[in-house]
Image (cartoon, rainbow, N blue to C red):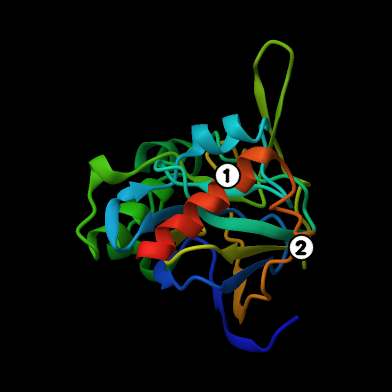
């Protein structure tokens, strides 16, 4: 593990954004257990290039995200690779909470009435952070929900697994290109908790080790090798 460059804690029910440089590892740590981190990715040099959840799952023949998976853009490049994961299952099919969903499940708590105890939703959180970069409603795409698992029954019914992530669990993302990251710590849309969940997440930045021939993401499937080659071509002329 390389030197820790920066770390902080994002409280539950909050949002943030930043640009991660190529060659940086972002570690997300579920501080207390039961966290959910909604996340979207954009190319800061061309905001029309963004995370593509369907291609990410389809080309890697998977329904979940875990170690060895790459997160693809809609231009066939890799934003980041999952190089370590103590959880084993991260959701990228269920999307976000909305204001109406949060109000129906946990009631309405506005900032004007409740100050820091107000209840944010994932959709509005992405809009607030995206607005700082000129992104709006039409720019939102299907997002990742780190630390969250959804089981699917034979009839297609989906069930949220509240025991998927424990205190101290983590996932490491190695960024393969400069990436604008929008994130929030609002509840997963299928979370049935009786009270609005507020699970904090610690995040850390480190420099990435150079990719080696036995890299877990490079060798996970032929598609990843092609995606990372697309990155090499992009940076060759970038």
Q: Residues within 10 Å of mark 2 (few under 14, many from 20)?
A: many
- On screen, residue 126 versus residue 151, left or right, reads left
Q: Nearer the viewer, residue 46 or 99?
A: 46
Furthest residue toward top? 155
Neighbour class for label 1 at 10 Å: few (<14), some, many (≥20)? some
Return the x and y of residue 141 as percentages of the image width and height.
38, 41
Mark 2 and mark 1 in contact? Answer it, CB < 8 Å. Answer: no
- Does residue 181 show up? no
Q: Residue at x 58, y 29 (%)?
A: 58
- Report x, y in % for residue 23: 55, 73
Q: Secondary structure at mark 1?
A: helix
Front residue of 104 and 206:
206
Q: Is residue 68 visible?
A: yes
Q: Position of residue 52 (x, y in %)?
A: 45, 40
Q: From what the image shows, is residue 166 above or below residue 194?
A: below
As helix, strand or loop, the secondary structure at mark 2 comes to loop
Front-lying residue, 165 or 211: 211
Where residue 226 is drawn, which disc sits there? 1
- Distance CA(mark 2)–CA(mark 1): 30 Å
The disc at residue 106 is none
Q: Quadrant of residue 74?
A: top left
Find residue 158 and report its image quarter.
Answer: top right
* Left or right, residue 72 beside residue 15: right
**Residue 98: percent from left, percent from top:** 39, 41
* Residue at 37%, 55% in the rendered image: 42
* The C terminus lies in quadrant: bottom left
Where is mark 2, residue-wise? 169
The residue shown at (55%, 39%) is: 56
Q: Name which quarter of the figure residue 82 lies in.
A: bottom right
In depth, the one of 176 and 225 nearer the eye is: 225
Would you say 121 lies left or right of 139 here? right
């Amino acid at each position: 593990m390389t030197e820790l460059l920066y770390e902080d804690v994002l409280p539950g029910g909050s949002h943030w954004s930043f640009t991660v440089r190529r060659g940086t590892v972002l570690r997300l740590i579920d501080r207390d257990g039961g966290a959910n981190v909604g996340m979207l990715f954009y190319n800061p040099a061309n905001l029309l290039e963004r995370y593509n959840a369907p291609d990410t799952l389809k080309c890697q023949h998977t329904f979940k995200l875990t170690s060895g998976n790459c997160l693809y853009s809609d231009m066939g490049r890799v934003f980041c690779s999952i190089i370590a994961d103590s959880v084993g299952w991260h959701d990228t099919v269920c999307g976000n909470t909305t204001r109406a969903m949060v109000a129906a499940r946990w009631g309405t708590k506005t900032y004007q009435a409740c100050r820091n105890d107000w209840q944010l939703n994932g959709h509005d959180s992405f809009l607030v952070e995206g607005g700082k970069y000129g992104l709006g409603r039409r720019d939102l795409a299907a997002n990742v929900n780190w630390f969250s698992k959804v089981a699917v029954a034979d009839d297609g019914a989906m069930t949220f697994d509240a025991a998927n992530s424990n205190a101290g669990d983590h996932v490491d993302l190695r960024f393969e290109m400069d990436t604008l990251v929008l994130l929030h710590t609002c509840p997963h849309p299928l979370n049935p908790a009786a009270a609005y969940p507020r699970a904090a997440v610690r995040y850390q930045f480190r420099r990435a080790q150079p990719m080696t021939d036995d890299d877990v993401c490079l060798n996970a499937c032929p598609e990843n090798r092609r995606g990372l080659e697309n990155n090499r071509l992009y940076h060759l002329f970038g």
